Image: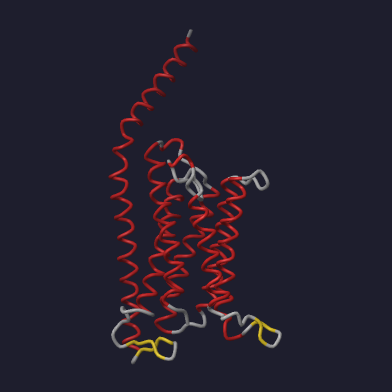
Amino acid sequence: MGSFPGHAIPGTLFLVIGVWHMWCSLNRYASNPKSFRVRVWNPVPGFDGRLKYLELYVIAIGAFFDLCIEFLYSTHLKIIVHGVLNPSHMNDFEHSGMLLMFFIFGVVALLSEKTRYLPLPEGALCLVASAAFTAEYLLFYFHSTTHKGLEGWYHFILVLLIGLCILSTIAGALMPTSFPADLCSGMAMTLQGLWFYQTAFTLYGSMMPDGCLLKDNEVKCHSPEHEIRGELLANFQLFIQAFSVLAAVAGAYIYIEPKYRGSNSIRSRALDDADDQNIISSDR
């Protein structure tokens, strides 16, 4: 069984990075659709380049901070008991392994972008990110088999969203000019962050469905009917979140596109004029 902070902290990281990724993807596509390229991370513009790598620092530091909470604070430093890993904190160790993968991704990306020691193309960084999501998927997939009832259903939906993150990130590596793959990656991360929050508020907060309660560190429902009602409510919550993200993407693009419409028209006319000149020159 987890906790409210245990879901809210990673949810915040995924939500912030996902929203930033969607915004940057829409901006890059609207500014020049023909030269669009998939990016696994997006630099922060302005500030004389001082915040360029902020996203990667947020990923690395955020993952490391959450890793310390899971591995050190949650275990009360009782990591080894009688020569083996403390069996009462295996849940924390599993989460630590997942967070370690995202920390590694952040560090690898920073080394690749800021130094000459590990130069990696964007496609390779996409695959490193997909490896981190795969570790998360495997954790929650096998971890979720121990969850039952309503709690298990919420974690099952989380596993589906993580799988979408994996597929969209790999698609970005295989199709480096695909705007849908890049945008889908940001949307999947955003939905994952939102669902972490939804799980926290539902299972450990004030949104517990009627007929269910948190007792003895386990979610229990009074009857199968109450459990089914809770699962249907979870499906509706997922639909609302997915619809909201789609609406936000559409609204953001409607807001962004007019800013680049004029420059794109000028660029297109310039390219057409250049093509005409090339045709005239070849005819001569």
User: How many circles with numbers are drawn on the protein?
Assistant: 0
User: Which residue lies at the image location 62% right of the left edge and 84% below the top edge?
Assistant: 86
Q: Position of residue 106 (x, y in %)?
A: 56, 56
Near-viewer residue (150 or 118): 118
Task: Spot the residue most to the top.
Answer: 284
Query: Residue 223, relative to residue 231: is it above or below?
Result: below
Query: Residue 106, relative to residue 211: is it above or below?
Result: above
Near-viewer residue (123 or 46): 46
Q: Position of residue 71 (x, y in %)?
A: 58, 74
Q: Position of residue 45 (x, y in %)?
A: 43, 42
Q: Quadrant of residue 279?
A: top left
Q: Quadrant of residue 60?
A: bottom right
User: Which residue lies at the image location 48% right of the left edge and 51% below the top edge?
Assistant: 54
User: Which residue lies at the image location 40% right of the left edge and 86% below the top edge?
Assistant: 219
Left/right of residue 66 with respect to residue 116 in the rendered view: left
Task: Spot the residue most to the right.
Answer: 83
User: Which residue lies at the image location 30% right of the left edge and 88% below the top edge?
Assistant: 211
